[in-house]
Image (tube, rainbow, N blue to C red):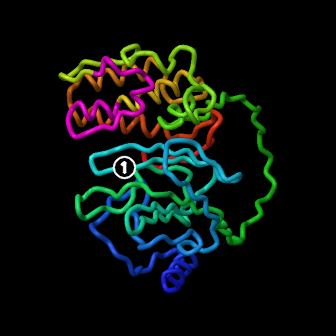
């Protein structure tokens, strides 16, 4: 453990990840921003990234959690490869350690610390080539962020030349773009254990049928029994219907974001039109491309009661 700690100290000092002695079952899949590094046993944030504060979440479940400083919203979902999760936070996170099986995956972001990421997971179980179950998640935060110190550049002092001073022309500043994740909307219905106040708009409520906004029977698939709320928990898959599940999940969040009126890039009409056009194409690539676009918008930063002004660098 001392050897591992010393090497991570060198990385933080030089911002260069040196070779780390580690055990890896298979080459792990990368998250949205960084590739995970496997560490055996159960190290703490202090062991992995000295100088950080640790916020440990156990057991792992959907929801918004806080230690009084860091606020994180977690959205857990099942995939063909096993459980993964997305997160957003109110302040910069330097690293995330995902424990599962005999060790865990370290997602080290510093010095490019983040407030959102997607698709994080535990190490791969070599017995079935899927991810181990999520035992706990440790969020490591609090490192001082590097700053650029400008150099003094000599400048020539120009002579005074009379100039015409233009009048100020007022300009309209467009509203900042925002977007809340599917996990946020799942956890802000006002009902059920652990749910927070209902943030849904009056036009679209959790129990409304998915068909209120979107096609539900395209390409031989049938989602007519889904509600807007249940669609937020669809898992996706490798078929056309699985691709539609992925799109529905992003689409419902996009619909609610647009309806909220806080500056989402698309209107509700835009969302409905784009999603239904993609569904009707019956083309998996087209459907997933629309899902990816909406997912990027949904991670622009949530101003409604949860982590706000998050950064998203995936799209």
For the question of whether residue 147 can be seen, the reply is no
Front residue of this view, candidates 169 and 13: 13
Instruction: Residue 227: say if magenta.
Output: yes
The residue at the point 52 percent across, 24 percent down is 258
Q: How many labels, in total?
A: 1
Q: Is residue 206 left or right of residue 241?
A: right
The residue at the point 61 percent across, 32 percent down is 196
Q: Position of residue 152 (x, y in %)?
A: 71, 71
Q: In this rendering, is residue 266 above or below 121? A: above
Outermost left residue: 220
Q: Position of residue 222 (x, y in %)?
A: 25, 21
Please tell me in which quadrant of the rendered image residue 242 appears: top left
Q: In this rendering, is residue 153 above or below 79? A: below
Please tell me in which quadrant of the rendered image residue 73 appears: top right
Front residue of this view, candidates 235 and 9: 235
Counting other residues with Cα less than 10 Å from the Cα at mark 1, is it few (<14), some (14-19), or many (20 or more)?
Answer: some
Quadrant occupied by the C terminus:
top left
Local SS, label 1: strand
Q: In this rendering, is residue 81 above or below 110? A: above
For the question of whether residue 132 can be seen, the reply is yes
> What segment carries the magenta color?
223-247
Front residue of this view, candidates 286 and 1: 1
Residue located beneath label 1 in the image:
83
Q: Position of residue 311 (x, y in %)?
A: 55, 47
The residue at the point 29 percent across, 22 percent down is 223
Instruction: Residue 119: say if magenta.
Output: no
The residue at the point 58 percent across, 29 percent down is 263
């Amino acid at each position: 453990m001392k050897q591992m700690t010393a090497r991570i100290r060198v990385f933080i000092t030089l911002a260069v990840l040196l070779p780390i002695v580690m055990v890896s079952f298979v080459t792990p899949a990368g998250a949205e921003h960084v590739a995970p590094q496997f560490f055996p046993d159960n190290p703490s944030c202090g062991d992995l990234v000295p100088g950080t504060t640790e916020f440990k979440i156990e057991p792992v479940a959907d929801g918004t959690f806080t230690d009084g400083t860091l606020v994180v919203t977690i959205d857990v979902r099942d995939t063909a490869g096993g459980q993964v999760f997305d997160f957003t936070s109110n302040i910069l996170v330097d690293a995330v350690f995902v424990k599962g099986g005999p060790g865990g995956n370290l997602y080290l972001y510093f010095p490019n610390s983040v407030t959102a990421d997607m698709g994080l997971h535990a190490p791969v179980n070599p017995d079935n080539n899927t991810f181990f179950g999520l035992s706990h998640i440790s969020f490591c935060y609090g490192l001082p962020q590097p700053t650029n110190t400008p150099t003094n550049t000599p400048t020539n002092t120009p002579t005074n030349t009379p100039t015409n001073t233009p009048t100020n022309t007022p300009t309209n500043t467009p509203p900042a773009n925002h977007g809340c994740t599917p996990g946020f909307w799942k956890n802000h219905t006002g009902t059920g254990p652990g749910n927070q106040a209902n943030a849904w708009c009056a036009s679209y409520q959790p129990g409304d049928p998915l068909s209120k906004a979107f096609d539900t029977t395209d390409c031989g698939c049938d989602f007519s029994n889904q509600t807007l709320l249940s669609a937020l928990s669809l898992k996706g898959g490798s078929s056309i219907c699985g691709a539609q599940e992925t799109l529905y999940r992003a689409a419902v969040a996009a619909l609610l974001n647009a309806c909220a009126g806080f500056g989402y890039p698309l209107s509700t009409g835009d969302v409905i039109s784009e999603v239904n056009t993609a569904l009707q194409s019956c083309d998996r690539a087209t459907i997933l491309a629309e899902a990816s676009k909406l997912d990027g918008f949904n991670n622009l930063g949530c101003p409604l009661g949860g982590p706000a002004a998050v950064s998203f660098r995936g799209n």
